[in-house]
Amino acid sequence: MQLGTERLILRPWCSSDAENLYEYAKDPEVGPIAGWPSHTSVENSREIIKDVLSVDETYAVCLKADNKAIGSIGLMIGNASNLDLTDMEGEIGYWIGKPFWGNGYIPEAAKELIRHGFEDLKLEKIWCGYFEGNIKSKHAQEKCGFIYHHTNRDIHWEMMDDIRTEHVTCLPGEKWRCGLSMNKGIREEVMEEFEFRNIRLEEAEEAAEIERVCFPPNEACSKEMILERVTKAPELFLVAIDKHTGEMAGFLNGIATNEYSFRDEFFKDANLHDPNGRNIMLLGLDVIPKYRKQGLARELMYRYLRRERENGRNLILLTCIQSKVKMYKKMGFRDEGIANSTWGGIQWHEMSCVIG
């Protein structure tokens, strides 16, 4: 199998790569810091290609210009990893020759392998790690979205026969999908047509009317609930205003909390809002019918997620009916199953998106 990026080809290793491999893997600044000894000869590199690198999901990193190997990247799944992983998890390992440092090739290759792991291999988590002092690897992992998980101190590293400290990072699938959604480009036509900002107090009744129009009576929040929410948490009430008419076309609102599960009281009691809360409970994504099918709901969501990530939030939760699960999955949310909510006397799914 072969993968590709804008500048790179990720392909299986072959015996003819031995000379290129040795050229970069003999450098004492490359292998030891990554946990393996420098190569001693072309023949040694050829043996390593045969015995180590010729396994599934291990790729030579090559420039598209000449398809010559300049580094290596691989995904070790389940018990193939040095970590204690399930069959639905993988660990990424990588290195690149010193002449190519500082060009962003490893983050570029890793992002493609991460995509392959989550989309094609259906993994749930991807792990990575770096040894104490390997700042370049640490920065590469941060660029790919990995977050610190734990540290293994004073471990014996068999390949180098020494004692090391290893820092382990993790990228959950839901965080990757949410990040992918937030990084999608803003549609220029949506920007031209709408202004996105926090609600103003005098617009509360207009928002309440939109809620009435968008939801059946048993699902809609009351006018009083909307007014209280606008008063208590206007900074979490994002509106889209038609630039030509001044009309509110839609909105997305929620409240902040340190709780991790959705409950119906969040709809009814805006006093549960904690401005310093790490999590957001979304309480309504509303778009007037005549403004639908223009990507407005998606744009509201992406802007909201990006903004709250910048504000230091960790988790976004919402509830939706079965027919909307697919839509929210496309926005980067994960279906957590049937929610505790009985709002409106119907069954809801709880959806989550990790952003911090």
Image: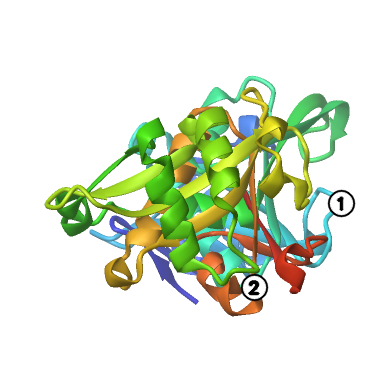
Q: Residue at x 74, y 32 (%)?
A: 258
Q: Nearer the viewer, mark 1 or mark 2?
A: 2
**Quadrant of image for the C terminus:** top right
SS assignment at label 1:
loop
Asked if residue 84 shows in the view, the reply is: yes
Q: Nearer the viewer, residue 74 or 268?
A: 268
The residue at which mark 2 appears reads as: 321
Q: Residue at x 48, y 58 (%)?
A: 211
| In the displayed structure image, the side of residue 295 where residue 213 appears, left or right | right
Q: Nearer the viewer, residue 4 or 188?
A: 188
Q: Percent from the top left, x then y, of residue 348?
A: 72, 69
Image quadrant where residue 8 sits: bottom left
Q: Nearer the viewer, residue 346 or 22?
A: 346
At label 1, the amino acid type is: Asp
Asked if residue 303 shows in the view, the reply is: no
- For disc 1, the neighbor class at 10 Å (few under 14, some 14 to 19, many from 20) is few
| In the displayed structure image, the side of residue 162 where residue 214 appears, left or right | left
| In the displayed structure image, the side of residue 154 where residue 230 appears, left or right | left
At label 2, the amino acid type is: Ile
The residue at which mark 1 appears reads as: 84
SS assignment at label 2:
loop
Way the structure is coloured: rainbow
Q: Percent from the top left, x then y, of residue 298?
A: 40, 60
- For disc 2, the neighbor class at 10 Å (few under 14, some 14 to 19, many from 20) is few
Q: Percent from the top left, x then y, of residue 317?
A: 66, 51
Circle 1/circle 2 CB separation < 8 Å: no
User: Compared with residue 298, is residue 40 higher up or lower down, i.e. above or below?
Assistant: above
Q: Nearer the viewer, residue 291 or 119?
A: 291
Q: How many marks?
A: 2
